[in-house]
Image (spheres, rainbow, N blue to C red):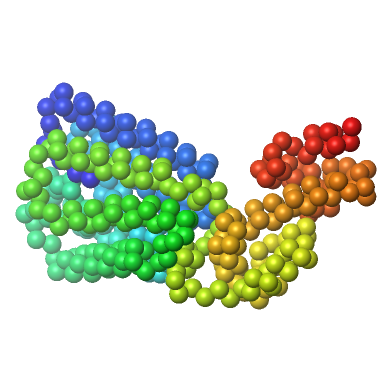
Amino acid sequence: MYTSFNTPPPQTMDTIQLLYFSAFAFSIIVCFDILFKLKRPFILKLYLLGISLSVSIASITYSFDENPLKYYYIIVVGKAVLAFCFLNILSTIYFKKYKYWTLIIGILLILVTLFSFYYFVAINSNYLFTLKGQTLIILKRLSYNPPLFIKMTRIIILTSMISTLFYFAYLIIFKFDLNNLYFNQVKNWTIAIASLAFIMFAFYFVPDSLFSNDFVNHLSSIIFNYLVLLTVFYRPNFLNKSSLKIGFGDTFSKSENNPINNLEFINTFFSNCYYINPDANIKDLSNQLNVSSEVLYNYIYNNYSQSFNDLVNQYRIEYFLDIINKPKYHNYTIDALSKEVGFSSRNHLYKPFKKFHGGNPSDLLDAMRK
């Protein structure tokens, strides 16, 4: 979070650069972890990658350059991207109706950051040397008084960001139902995300004189980078496995009304064996139940703790295990059985079979037919 352009002693700087490089190495691990483990929603994956890459770029810059003035615009924009991602993660997980608001103020944040930086550099060639590393997003001054329009723009954006963050945090902590296991997991994690964002904003208002020690500035930056990466890396495991496109704020809100009748869902999905329909999909079923796809996602997740696709595949596998014991199906091939339970081919059967039963269907059939 902090940087300084007054270089510490050589041995100390070597240690600092090594620590920055270790943060960079960890950030690469985190990026690959997100790419390969997190499924959907894609936008959440994008924001988490944005956080990790922002830390990665800043860390690698400081690990190879003791005085990175020529890269400072990258670091400044990286901080803006970091703040942008923090806020939009909260809106993605909890507050979908505010997603356009957080996108707009986040984009404005990045644009104003770039404009402020290049404006100050253009009118004052020594401006870079006046900057402090605890500069958060919209650049602070030490000896230069910016024009009124820049001051007002910065105040408006900062006020909007901070007030939105406070509002989100208040709802997450005090207003949502805390008795759900999945909510408790994601709640603790998002409180950590919100806390990191609050730290960033808080240090925008800290006087520069309080952080004049270069080593402390660098060390604080490294610690903050690691906290960010650890928070992303240790996200709730069910987020990786879920393919849901839902807002948890709506899912777990006490005021949420459930428009789906349980008996109607059970009759449509289970009694009529909707899951063996080869064209089964969330949109089609939501149309049959006369609700939106998002409402159906939320309903399934709350009641069955899994995604629509997993629910369909689980009961296709159970149906498969049921019919292979019936004489009618004794001579069916794996391909024929796969299509009978709703899969388009045997290749699409194997992965769900292993997930919900274990082993593979061929071995099971061979053992039964000996």
> Front-most of 190 and 180?
180
Among the 4 quarters of the image, the one containing residue 187: bottom left
All told, the count of numbered labels is: 0
Is residue 275 among the parts visible in the rendering?
Answer: yes
Residue 196 horizontal side relative to residue 100, left or right: left
Residue 78 horizontal side relative to residue 319, left or right: left
- Of all residues, the one furthest to the front in this rendering is 179
Q: Is residue 309 above or below residue 229?
A: below
Among the 4 quarters of the image, the one containing residue 204: bottom left
Among the 4 quarters of the image, the one containing residue 100: bottom left
Residue 213 horizontal side relative to residue 60, left or right: left
> Front-most of 30 and 263?
263
Rendered-image quadrant of the C terminus:
top right
Q: Residue at x 89, y 36 (%)?
A: 369
**Residue 206 x, y percent position in the rendering:** 13, 54
Q: Residue at x 20, y 67 (%)?
A: 155
**Residue 215 x, y percent position in the rendering:** 14, 35
> Front-most of 332 and 23?
332
Residue 314 horizontal side relative to residue 25, left or right: right
Q: Residue at x 41, y 43 (%)?
A: 234
Q: Residue at x 37, y 48 (%)?
A: 51
**Residue 365 x, y percent position in the rendering:** 83, 38
Q: Is residue 347 above or below residue 316?
A: above
**Residue 310 x, y percent position in the rendering:** 64, 53
Is residue 69 among the parts visible in the rendering?
Answer: no
